[in-house]
Image (cartoon, grey):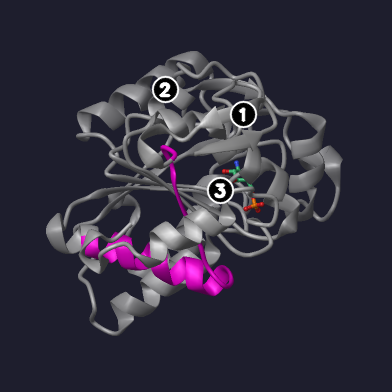
Amino acid sequence: MVYTTYAGEFPLQNGRPNVEVVIVSDAKAGGELIAGAMAELLRRKPDALLGVATGSTPLPIYQALAATVDAGGVDVSRARVAQLDEYVGLPAEHPESYRSVLRREVLEPLGLDLDAFMGPDGTAEDVRAACEAYDRALAEAGGVDLQLLGIGTDGHIGFNEPCSSLASRTRIKTLTEQTRVDNARFFEGDIEQVPHHVITQGIGTILEARHLVLLATGEGKADAVAATVEGPVAAVCPASALQLHPHATVVVDEGAASKLKLAEYFRHTYSNKPAWQGI
Ligand code: GLP
């Protein structure tokens, strides 16, 4: 079988593309599916290191996981949480520092305190040393077991903007204007308040997690999702690096799936997958 992408025609490798794509009805269903996989992981490994992402997209995941915890479905008391990226220069207590956001949206609802949390220091005087220290700390913690990812409209993961090296480590990056515009909504709609610089786990760092799970919802993400899973592996679409990972799952709602040429194939493979396999 041959399929046509932006880059030309390609034979399907081994009958399936590398990244598993799961098309769900809506964001809530996506959140529940992914929270279920996280709960399953925590049952197997109670002190799993969960890599968490910010943005609006992962919120249904955190809500579903907190609901499972409240219902007694899983014990998260030994879980550990690792941050994906951070703004440079925002004090940790600033309400929009990612540390604050994750505290509000992940740690508190799950009943975890800051002892369970690790992240880069966005206020460090020596940012380069802070980045290297965080990369080392992740490895010393045994590596991330499951890394949640959102995706930027330009295909970024974490804050790895287009043309980030696919081998990059945690480092400082400059945001594109588009990302600052996209994120201004968290800063009273005022782009001037959005920092220009960030620390992000590099793409090489992200690829070291044992399972990558990217959630994308809404038509605004459809082009980025199509480039991620059906385009070539290319730094211009950083999320396409997921194709290099042996266990990457991309969960999309109908809107985000709307530009996938292989949508029917993805639906078919997922609906015929044995349930015990999970995602
Ligand atoms: C920010 C974060 C990313 C996130 C992206 C998309 O740039 N650094 O990790 O994936 O926003 O956010 P949203 O899910 O709100 O569209």
Q: Could you tell whether 209 is left or right of 259 in the image? A: left
Q: Could you tell whether 31 is left or right of 82 in the image? A: right
Does the closest atom of ligand 1 sit within 8 Å of the Cβ of label 3?
Answer: yes
Residue 273, image x, y percentages? 31, 62
Q: Which mark is residue 204?
A: 2
Q: Which mark is residue 86?
A: none
Q: In the rendered structure, which disc, 1 or 3, sits on the residue that comes first in sequence?
A: 1
Nearer to us in this view, 204 or 256: 256
- Split into 4 quadrants, where in the image is the C terminus? bottom left
Q: Are marks 1 and 3 in contact (CB under 8 Å)?
A: no
Tag count in the figure?
3
- Residue under label 1: 9
Q: In the rendered structure, which disc, 2 or 3, sits on the residue that comes first in sequence?
A: 3
Q: Could you tell whether 14 is left or right of 42 in the image? A: right
Residue 270, image x, y percentages? 40, 61
Give me the residue at 63% from left, 59% from top.
217
View extreme (front): residue: 1
Mark 2 neighbour density, 10 Å: few (under 14) some (14–19) many (20 or more): some
Q: Which mark is residue 150?
A: 3
Disc 1 on helix, strand or loop? strand
Residue 29, image x, y percentages? 49, 73
Q: Are marks 2 and 3 in contact (CB under 8 Å)?
A: no
What range is drawn magenta here? 17-40
